Image (cartoon, rainbow, N blue to C red):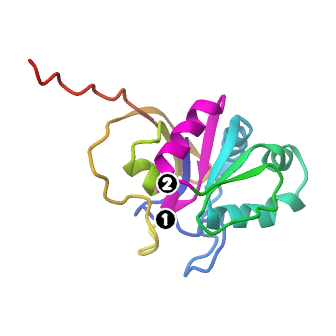
Amino acid sequence: MLTEFISLDGVVEAPGGEDFTYPDWSLEVDRGDDGEAFKEDEALGSAALLLGRRTYEGFASAWPQYEGRLADKYNSMPKYVVSGTLRDPAWTNTTVLADDLVPAVSQLKQDVAGDICVAGSVQLAQALLAEDLVDEIHLMTFPVILGHGRTLWAATPAKTDWRLADARTYGDGVLVTILERTPRAKPADPRR
């Protein structure tokens, strides 16, 4: 499951910090108690986290200092970080995936019982979408146009089809859409 905070113009950069023209832009819009509960339930329902190195470093520096149900979940759950440079992750229960992305993530999807949550991690998210390794997308769309920044959508080698599974509005107009990958068509038999 890929989950992203996203602006109306598709920007996913720095929704909760980082060095950006509009840091914390998602925090400027109230998503209400129900929106907060949605994000918490999403995290608590996940079996593992799959993150890119930069997102991992942000999470690893923040979550160990927090307490509560969500912090306990993040701090104890299995975490997988895709990185060619990270060698010795300090955050509890972290495994580095340094090998080829496709076989590593394909194996992870077979080994982990339950949802693997990819949060943020723009470069990783784009690679997973390009390789058709995402089964579900959760977009929390904030009613703001940022005008620039890293976007979620990048070129992919082929068309993929998705089904809108759910759509809800929270707080001050924050739209959550849940999209599920439709079954992949089997290639036509060339003998026919």
* Residue closest to the far front: 99
Circles 1 and 2: CB atoms closer than 8 Å: no
Would you say residue 59 is visible in this rendering?
yes
Residue at horizontal 43 percent and vertical 60 percent from the top? 8
Which of the image's four quarters has the C terminus?
A: top left
- In the rendering, at what x and y percent does residue 183 appear? 36, 26
Question: What element does badge 2 sit on?
Answer: helix
Would you say residue 34 is visible in this rendering?
no
Q: Which residue is mark 1?
A: 144
Residue at horizontal 76 percent and vertical 61 percent from the top? 89
> Where is 154 relative to 44, above or below?
below
Q: Is 134 part of what is drawn in magenta? A: no
Amino acid at circle 1: Val
- The numbered disc on residue 125 is 2
Q: Judge the density around disc 1: few (<14), some (14-19), many (≥20) Cα neighbours within 10 Å.
A: some
In the figure, is residue 169 to the left or right of 62? Answer: left
- In the rendering, at what x and y percent does residue 138 appear? 53, 43
Question: What element does badge 1 sit on?
Answer: loop
Disc 1/disc 2 C-alpha distance (Å): 22 Å
Q: Quadrant of residue 47?
A: top right
- In the rendering, at what x and y percent does residue 46 appear? 68, 37
Mark 1 or 2 closer to N-term? 2
Stretch of the chain drawn in magenta: 99-125
Amino acid at circle 2: Ala
Residue in front for this viewpoint, 33 or 150:
150
Nearest to viewer (mark 1 / mark 2): 2
In the figure, is residue 69 to the left or right of 145? Answer: right
Which of the image's four quarters has the N terminus?
A: top right
